[in-house]
Amino acid sequence: MTSPMREALEQVQHLLQQTSVRGELDSQFEGMEDAETIRILRECGQVQRLVDAAITTVVTRARHRDTGLPSEKITTVAGCRDVTELTRRALRVDAGTARRYVRAADAVGKDFLLSGEHAAAHYEQLGQSLRDGELSVTGLLAAIGPVERASTRIGPDEREAVDALLANTARGLDLPDELGNAGPAPSTDELADYARALMLALDPDGAEPDDAKADRSRSFWIGKLHDGTHPFGGHALPEVAGLIQRLMDAFNNPAADSSPSLGSGAVAFEPEDADPAGAADPGPAMGPDPDLVDGLPVPDDPRTPAQRNHDNLAAILYAAAASGAVPDLGGAAPTLVVSVTAADYAAGHGRAFIEGTGDDVPLSVARHTACAGGVQRVLFDERGQIVSIGTTARIFTAIQRRAIHLRDRECVIPGCHVPATWCEIHHVREHADGGPTHTSNGASYEYTR
């Protein structure tokens, strides 16, 4: 027997398919006024919210049918592990979307009691707003998120009051016009902000810090290579985050003696012109000099703050690997090995292999690595035999750097007077071309790209 809900959905599906016939949908908008386009977009939103409500209702039913004996569960009949997998496969959506529908069903669905009656929903008023098409599942979860985080610190009466306030806000009833008509309904972000404001008023102190939970939540992960980079992230304990920030501050300090960069490009400069022809007198400076921080000049750096922090992190990791304070790997200090064939390396193009990640990357990655820190090149012939092994003596030592700074005093580029302690030490003859890492082959350059 076909249920009324299924019959209604089939009718809606049939009408939408007729409207969206290939080649006809675009033609319907020819000559249409913008106001009508906006109204149609709003109607689409209404239909989408009603579909959200229908899906949530069906998922609630599936949850009820997933209790009892394993052989009688709806998930067993469907061959699924749980209701989330059933929802994901039935809707053809990702796991995150399926979980959101299950969470919504938990929030607004009514559980069956042993007496056969329905229990009250956790959020009765918000559930009704969802069923009326005034609220989407995304909006529902955004609204109840702050409430759920404070669930153990507020009572049932407060939860019920917040439920009613949020439901009225979702309908626009809290912002009526001068005639008492409902005002504009808020967006998902605005409703979430209002929910956070309500909970801040009810629970200003927030939850007590949970040291055990924070300790369990600490994490760090590195994702798979995508478009030439690896995503990574995690959760750092406060002291670890503070240490990372202090290290970043040390590198970003305008007075720091190094500004590592993994970018490519040669050193560039513009000749100094103390009295350019026709230049007007700029007059006295007004306010603080934008090129000074704490009285120190800020180097011209085209990198974004995020790119600079990435390069800072690379320098920190290379310094840690070379410090001797970390455990050995394979009987030696951890060293990044970039493997390339001799033919590709001689041609200056081809592919390289990064040990540790298993990534097959362009040869340019090896150059990036060489700019940031120690790297060992291993060259192979076409039969896989080792024909050359490079060394890790790519970076000038601290003693060499101090000697070069003392010798050069300032940037060696004509017209550039940046102190040597603010400059990078570069090979005069490139290391890749056989230039030694020696004070006679090193010079102070202000880094620009």
Image (tube, grey):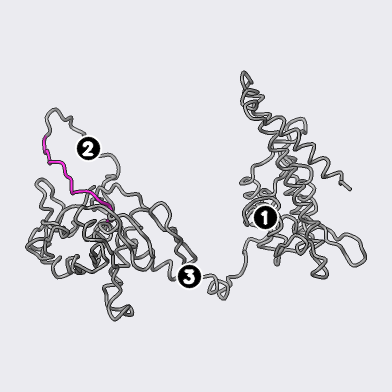
Q: Please name whichever residue, 93 or 100, is drawn nearer the observer in this view of the structure.
A: 93
The kind of residue on which mark 1 rests is: Arg
* Mark sitting on residue 237: 3
Q: Main secondary structure of the magenta part?
A: loop
In the rendered structure, does residue 264 fall within the stretch colored magenta? yes
Q: Earlier in the sequence, mark 3 or mark 2?
A: 3
Vertical arrangement, residue 214 with respect to residue 350, above or below: below
Q: Earlier in the sequence, mark 1 or mark 2?
A: 1
Q: Earlier in the sequence, mark 1 or mark 3?
A: 1
Please identify the quarter of the rendering in which residue 393 is found: bottom left
Secondary structure type for disc 1: helix
Give the residue at mark 1: 88
Q: Please name whichever residue, 146 or 395, is drawn nearer the observer in this view of the structure.
A: 395
With 217 as the anchor, is 2 left or right in this view? right
Alpha carbon distance from label 1 to label 3: 34 Å
The kind of residue on which mark 2 rests is: Pro
With 8 as the anchor, is 335 left or right in this view? left
Give the residue at mark 2: 284
